[in-house]
Image (spheres, helix red, strand yellow):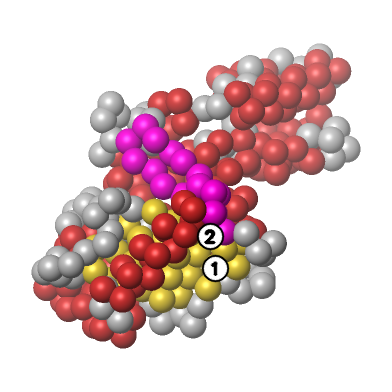
Amino acid sequence: MEPHDAVDEESTLVLRMIGRTVKRWRDRLNMTQAELGAAIGYSEEQVSSVERGRRAPSAAFLERADEVLGAGGMIAALCKEAEEARFPKKVRDLAKLEDQAIEICAYDNSVVNGLLQTQEYAKALYGMRRPAFSEEEIERLVAARMARQEIFHQQPARVFTFIMEEVTLQRPLGGRMVMRKQLEHLLEFGQRRDVEIQVMPTNREDHTGLAGAFKLLRLDNGETVGHSEAHLINRLFSHPKEIQLFEIRCGIIRAQALTPRESLAFIKKVLGEM
């Protein structure tokens, strides 16, 4: 993800609104930022950053501020908005589509799909980005990625299919311990009845996925949308001809990959060799 994804105009407006609200209640009590910080367990600089709209406050910050400032729930009610503002816009948009999906099919050719990533693996990926993200940006992006995984615990249940290249399992991104944990995570999810994981072997002589990674989302309203991301390009597809192309490719890629049972056996083998 590139710099312009870390903060967007919509998030900025929300954070400024939250900051103004906190400041307004603090001013009513003639309390300084340092005094508020001491009362709720945060530094003066953190309070200042929140009030200026530069920092997304945690739920704990807002709930404690609400209590100390006697806001009667007016500040605590902003927790949801603050949480969503922590995430880049394209992550929020994708998460909304995933929430509406009844079936998700994803093909990945370089890294494990974000919905299946462990926190350590995701942190390692964002840490490799050049120019480098700040620690605060990495924390924000990892939190956004982990939040998307709540979809696995929502009802009604969905159908998930993940096809990944063999190399995504063998490249020890973040180190061997991080990768071992990631492989164990894949094996755990591969046992779920709503998740199918397939591996595309490197030695295949015929491969339909060479155009790159993509995702298909069948929505509960009957529509299907596609999503693709590479470098500075992040696109959603909805034109029938484009969706038809993705559906054809997805079907062929699944046929060319190992079956789910064979894939789990392959992942176990890679784990044993790591």
Amino acid type, mark 2: Leu
Residue 85 found in image quarter: top right
Expressed as whole percent of the image width and height from the top left, the position of residue 225 reads 54, 54
Q: Which residue is drawn at the image coordinates 78% and 34% (left, top)?
A: 75
Q: Nearer the viewer, residue 256 or 43?
A: 256
Q: Which residues are magenta?
A: 224-240
The answer to whether mark 2 and mark 1 are in CB contact below 8 A is yes
Q: Is residue 273 left or right of residue 9?
A: left
* Local SS, label 1: strand
Q: CA distance from mark 2 to mark 1?
A: 6 Å
Expressed as whole percent of the image width and height from the top left, the position of residue 136 reads 44, 32
Residue under label 1: 103
Amino acid type, mark 1: Glu
Sequence-first tag of 2 and 1:
1
Above or below, 32 relative to 258? above
Q: Is residue 146 visible?
A: no
Residue 185 found in image quarter: bottom left
Expressed as whole percent of the image width and height from the top left, the position of residue 228 reads 41, 47
Q: Which residue is drawn at the image coordinates 30% and 45% (left, top)?
A: 125
Above or below, 97 relative to 93? below
**Residue lying at the far front of the rendered structure:** 241
Residue under label 2: 217
Q: Residues within 10 Å of mark 2 (few under 14, many from 20)?
A: many
**Is residue 159 inside the magenta stretch?**
no
